[in-house]
Amino acid sequence: MDGKVALITGGATGIGKKTAYMLAGSGAAVIITYRKSRKEAERVMEDIAASFGVRAMAIQADASIEEDCARAVGAVIENFGKIDIFIHNAGPYIQERKPMADYTSEEWNYLMNGNLNGFFYMAKEIIPSMRKNLWGRVISFGFERSDTAPAWIYRSAFAAAKSGLTSLTKTLALEEAPYGITVNMVCPGDITQEWKEKDIIEAAGISDDTVPVGRPGTGQDLARVIRFLCDHQSDFITGSIIPVTGGKDVLAKIFHK
């Protein structure tokens, strides 16, 4: 991945952070965006630059605001000359469970803009650079079974945005295939905050009887799949929706110990 430039939205913490380390460890220059976590983002970038000897940069940008997205992409192009890899990890989420009728318009628009429109805001600025270079990797994030557009009670806005993003991911894959650009989606299982920044070795030996493979999922599980999708030789994989769930997407309805 030497010479590649990767932009990861929401990369100051969690799965985005683990992905940043994974790509930097493979030789890519890494840029992350953050909304409020400035100290965390700058600390991550300083550590990555020192640990892997690659260029690293943190940019404040809210994925739900079009102007922020355009500004962030412009800053990356100005400083790095291109963007080879775009990973839309940022995804606003409201913890409170409530019916659709109880959402305010502001809450609904925030979730839609951050999860669905934010991908569009970023991608439309990035794709021309990738087309010019006849190479690119675009990766979005869904949720378990988002490719089936399932009902998710009390999570209507998030589920609708991610289901729409699933369709957009597939469409973009077909549109950009002639330019050497692949577009795929990864769908994490129930990886909790505690485990989003952990490695697989830390989960080994930890029992989780809600997961068929028997252990918790980690941020490294997702980062390894993303790294694979970004590889030069992964160009035959595009338009794919890839679950990383420990088997829960297959057996969740019947697997209960």
Image (cartoon, rainbow, N blue to C red):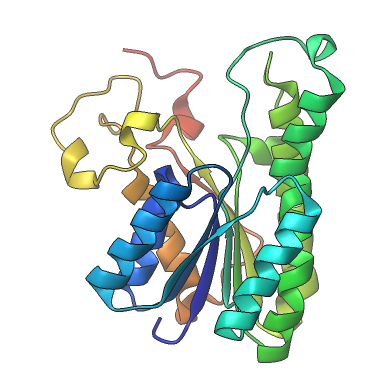
Q: Residue 250 appears at what percent x and percent y?
A: 49, 33
- Out of 201 and 178, give the one closest to the viewer: 201
Quarter residue 142 falls in: top right
Is 244 located above or below residue 152 in the figure? below
Quarter residue 97 falls in: top right
Is 199 located above or below residue 212 in the figure? below
Query: Could you tell me which residue is drawn at 42 percent across and 67 percent down?
Result: 228
Residue at the limit of the structure toward the bottom, as seen here? 133
Q: Residue 103 appears at what percent x and percent y?
A: 79, 16
Is 164 located above or below residue 136 in the figure? above
- Out of 7 and 156, give the one closest to the viewer: 7
Whether residue 212 is visible to the viewer of this picture, yes or no, is: no
So how many labels did they put on this image? 0
Q: Residue 186 appears at what percent x and percent y?
A: 54, 50
Is 70 located above or below residue 147 in the figure? below
Q: Residue 240 appears at what percent x and percent y?
A: 61, 57
In the image, taking residue 208 as reference, residue 204 lies left or right, namely left
Question: Where is the N terminus found, in terms of image quarters?
Answer: bottom left
Query: Could you tell me which residue is drawn at 80 percent across and 71 percent down?
Result: 175
Quarter residue 148 falls in: top right
Query: Could you tell me which residue is drawn at 42 percent across and 45 percent down?
Result: 13
Question: Where is the C terminus found, in terms of image quarters?
Answer: top left
Residue at the limit of the structure toward the front, as seen here? 39
In the image, taking residue 222 as reference, residue 85 lies left or right, namely right
Whether residue 201 is visible to the viewer of this picture, yes or no, is: yes
